[in-house]
Amino acid sequence: MTETFIELIIADDSNIVIECIRHWINDSPEVKLIGVVHEIGGLKSLIEIHESAIVLSSLHWILKQGKAKISPMVCKYPKVSYALCIHSNDYNSIQGLLEMGIKGFFGDESTREEMIKGLCDIKIHNYYMASEILAEFMEIKYKGNSFNNLEKAYLTKREIEILELILHGKSSKSIARSLNISKRTVDGHRAHINIKFGVKNAAQLYKKAGSYLFTF
């Protein structure tokens, strides 16, 4: 159990989305549902009281309410984190959503366990991307050569693959199996990644790597 539970606000007008999230977080000791809102006015009232909550909604709801209305709230209450459930055909929207201040992304393939882990990651590390979204997003960034500093541009394609797996809690042994390479090779890549990011261990890398994804 986390040291302090997660205060979760569901912001959506789809009963399917709401009930799915309710079902997934039911009986979870890490998450406490503090409210469900259908309109932006109700959301504003709740986050004024719960300024460290996580707001979970769908991209459809964000677009329906209007990014121009959501963005000022993101700026005014910086301790509140926003996460979205998005579909695979929404991946191209991620760049704009990141710039807007959205910190978490759950995809079509996300499971209950991944949602709980993702919410915990947002609480602790201030970001989360589901595996399939992270893989697609990093591939787009890599191919587009849109990195804006040396440490990003200097990562090799293999290091990007390994970093992706590290960010999802995979051990060197597990990464070696996934990529069909030796554990010694993985450890070598991890050492190079640590040097390039200026960190000494996995915990420091996990924290700093958030800037790799969320600073543009």
Image: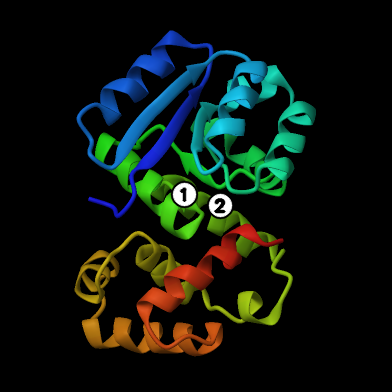
User: What's the distance in space between the residues labelled 2 and 1, CA to CA?
Assistant: 9 Å
Location of residue 112 in the rendering, given as x and y in whole percent from the top left corner: 27, 35
Q: Which label sits on residue 33?
A: none
Q: Residues within 10 Å of mark 2 (few under 14, many from 20)?
A: some
Give the residue drawn at x 24%, y 26%: 26
| Residue appearing at x 44%, y 51% in the figure | 123
Local secondary structure at mark 1: strand
Disc 2 secondary structure class: helix
Q: Position of residue 203 (x, y in %)?
A: 38, 75
Q: Is residue 136 above or below residue 184?
A: above
Checking the image for residue 129, the label placed there is 1
- Which mark's residue is nearer the viewer, 2 or 1? 1
Name the residue nearer the viewer: 41 or 23: 41
Q: Is residue 85 visible?
A: no
Q: Which residue appears at 41% of the width and 17% of the height?
A: 18
Q: Nearer the viewer, residue 140 or 21?
A: 21
Return the residue at label 2: 137
Give the mark nearer the N terminus: 2 vs 1. Answer: 1
Q: Amino acid at mark 1?
A: Met
